[in-house]
Image: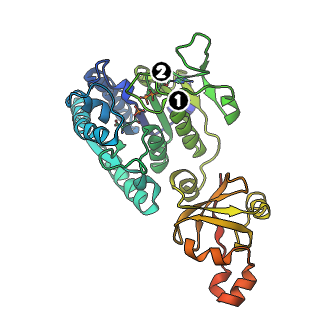
Amino acid sequence: MREAVTSARRVVVKIGSSSLTTASGGLDTARVDALADVLAGLCAAGREVVLVSSGAIAAGLAPLAIPRRPRDLATQQAAASVGQGLLIGRYAASLARHGLTVGQVLLTVDDVTRRAHYRNAYRTLRKLLDMRAVPIVNENDTVATEEIRFGDNDRLAALVAALVHADLLVLLSDVDALYTGDPARPDTRKVTDVRAETDLVGITLGRAGKAGVGTGGMVTKVEAARIATGFGIPVVLTAAPLAAAALAGDEVGTLFHPVRQRPTARLFWLAHATSPRGRLHLDPGAVQAVVARRKSLLPAGITAVDGTFTAGDPVDLVDSSGAPVARGLVNYDAVELPSLLGRSTVELAAALGPGYEREVVHRDDLVLL
Ligand SMILES: Nc1ncnc2c1ncn2[C@@H]1O[C@H](COP(=O)(O)OP(=O)(O)O)[C@@H](O)[C@H]1O
Ligand SMILES: N[C@@H](CCC(=O)OP(=O)(O)O)C(=O)O
């Protein structure tokens, strides 16, 4: 019995396209009904549920007579636009059988990465939960462009779990657990528990299984598990038909144990949810100061600046090989920085005024990567 699972009050469940569609590509209503039954069971037991459901693109293919998952964004978006309505309609009907109401929540990357926006998303999700409705989240595929797309809902689910302060994230796929390699091969073993990054050493994370339906495969699921467990949220990865057993605490699938206590929400978002707007190249002394001594970053330790950012934006701090070592909120606009580099704060204050004594990134706004 998994205590971390049975004690969870607020649960985020994510289901992949591969678990919702028939072999011919249409929406499998029996599977949607089966999932709805599991979710209704959770609600009846007084637990709160947020569902993150993929499947919009897959559900839109048959009605548009598209034979397989399209590669180009515009066709994917058209399919999602048709499919999302069908998907949510089906969930609404399935959950109505249990007297439950659904609320559709379509999110873009910005909605969960920009502070002002994610507060907004959080408020809506909270309100839906307070009103005993089941929020059903998907990426807002029809407006997301290639650059600002999640592309996979695994990461979105982990960020939503963090956003609503969930006690558990359940990732439902078409495979019953994480395996040491491609589960289709005979020599692979099931991994029942992942307690630390070292447990993943030697595991081959393959791409999506069912051709043309899922995206990301195990890579994005393990990445999602990293994000959630880093926020103190346990993650169970299993197959959709095992959802009820997994949620009852049975030892099915793979349990990713939380690796640490919850960090402050702000720094978590900085590390995992924000997209950096630029890069500050640090000399070795500055890397040492920021990483080992947890100091603020001063202009003297910066050798170069890339990107077009303004004060308050997230930026990556990179070492001399270009590898990111930390992320932080920068106190200057990109255009201001080049003339300050390599100069001490005392010198800058004397030459330019006391406003230039400020750190480039304050230690309170810094998170190590
Ligand atoms: N190490 C692994 N363990 C388990 N499954 C794996 C592994 N590597 C690749 N896979 C494949 O990942 C697939 C699940 O990913 P995906 O198709 O993206 O699912 P979903 O649509 O549920 O998000 C499985 O069907 C499986 O074939
Ligand atoms: N937003 C897309 C989901 C893409 C996606 O992540 O799919 P999957 O790998 O099946 O979870 C859709 O609804 O089709």
User: What residue is pinned by disc 2?
Assistant: 175
| Secondary element at tag 2 | loop
Vertical side of 95 occupied by 232: above or below: below
In depth, the one of 108 and 207 nearer the eye is 207
User: What residue is pinned by disc 1?
Assistant: 218
Residue at the extreme top of the image, as rendered: 186
Vertical side of 323 occupied by 280: above or below: below
> Residue drawn 42% across and 35% down?
13
Residue 296 percent across, percent down from the top left: 70, 68
Vertical side of 177 occupied by 266: above or below: below
> Residue drawn 37% across and 27% down?
213
In depth, the one of 51 and 323 nearer the eye is 323
| Secondary element at tag 1 | helix
**Mark 1 vs 2: CB contact within 8 A:** yes
Q: Is residue 332 left or right of residue 139?
A: right
> Residue drawn 57% across and 53% down?
268
Q: Decide: few, some or many residues near mark 2? Use Cα within 10 Å; few <14, some 14-19, many ≥20.
A: some
Q: Which dot, 1 or 2, sits closer to the camera?
A: 1
The quadrant of the image that shows the N terminus is top right
| Res. 78 image quadrant | top left
Residue 338 visible in the displayed image? yes
